[in-house]
Structures are given as structure tokens and as C-alpha cells.
Image (cartoon, rainbow, N blue to C red):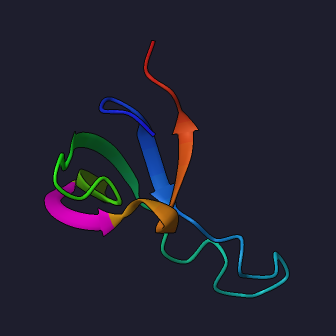
Amino acid sequence: MNVGDIVTDDRSHMDKSNLFYDAWLRLGLVVDIRQSNPTIATVIWYRSGKVWETNQEVSKLEVISERR
């Protein structure tokens, strides 16, 4: 995972037949990966016209599109 990647929440632990599989689909842009702890990424999220920032564990994110 790199700065500039577009990500979503990792849903690999869920079965695709689960009714809530697509219930909370959000897109995010990785804006920073900490030098002191590279397992934490700062992500700017977008969903339904709202934008917010969180610190997420890299293992809980799924890369949709890699930066070029």
C-alpha cells in the first residue's frame, strides 16, 4: 500500500451472501503512512457527499486502485 492508493474496507471476512456485504461501502484515499508505525495509514474517506479522515490499520484496508 502506498500514498495515493484508493482503498475500501477489507470485507474478505464476510460472505458475499451476507445482506450487509455492500451496506457500508466507502471509498478512501491514502494520504499518509506513518514512518514510525507503517501499519497505520491516514485515509480520507468519501461516502454520500461526506468527507472525513481516519487512521486505519493497513491490514483492514483493500486497495481498489493503485496510484501510478
Q: Residue furthest bottom?
A: 19
- Across and down, in percent, residue 29 comes to 31, 41
Prevalent SS, magenta region: strand
- Across and down, in percent, residue 12 comes to 71, 70
Task: Please tell me which residue lies in front, 22 or 40.
Answer: 40
Q: Report the side of 38 relative to 44 (left or right).
A: right
- Across and down, in percent, residue 59 comes to 50, 64
Determine the image quadrant of residue 19: bottom right
**Total count of labels:** 0
- Across and down, in percent, residue 31 comes to 20, 39
Q: Report the side of 65 relative to 50 (left or right).
A: right
Q: Residue furthest top?
A: 68
Q: Magenta segment range?
A: 50-56
Q: Is residue 4 above or below residue 44?
A: above
Determine the image quadrant of residue 68: top left
- Quadrant into which the N terminus falls: top left
Which residue is found at the position 81% from the left and 81% from the top?
A: 15
Q: Is residue 32 above or below residue 13?
A: above
Q: Is residue 15 above or below residue 48?
A: below
Q: Report the side of 67 relative to 46 (left or right).
A: right
Task: Please tell me which residue lies in front, 34 or 17.
Answer: 34
Which residue is found at the position 77% from the left and 87% from the top?
A: 18
Q: Report the side of 47 relative to 35 (left or right).
A: right
Which residue is found at the position 49% from the left and 68% from the top?
A: 60
Which residue is found at the position 29% from the left and 42% from the top?
A: 30
Reply yes or no: does residue 52 show up in magenta.
Answer: yes
Task: Please tell me which residue lies in front, 25 or 43.
Answer: 43
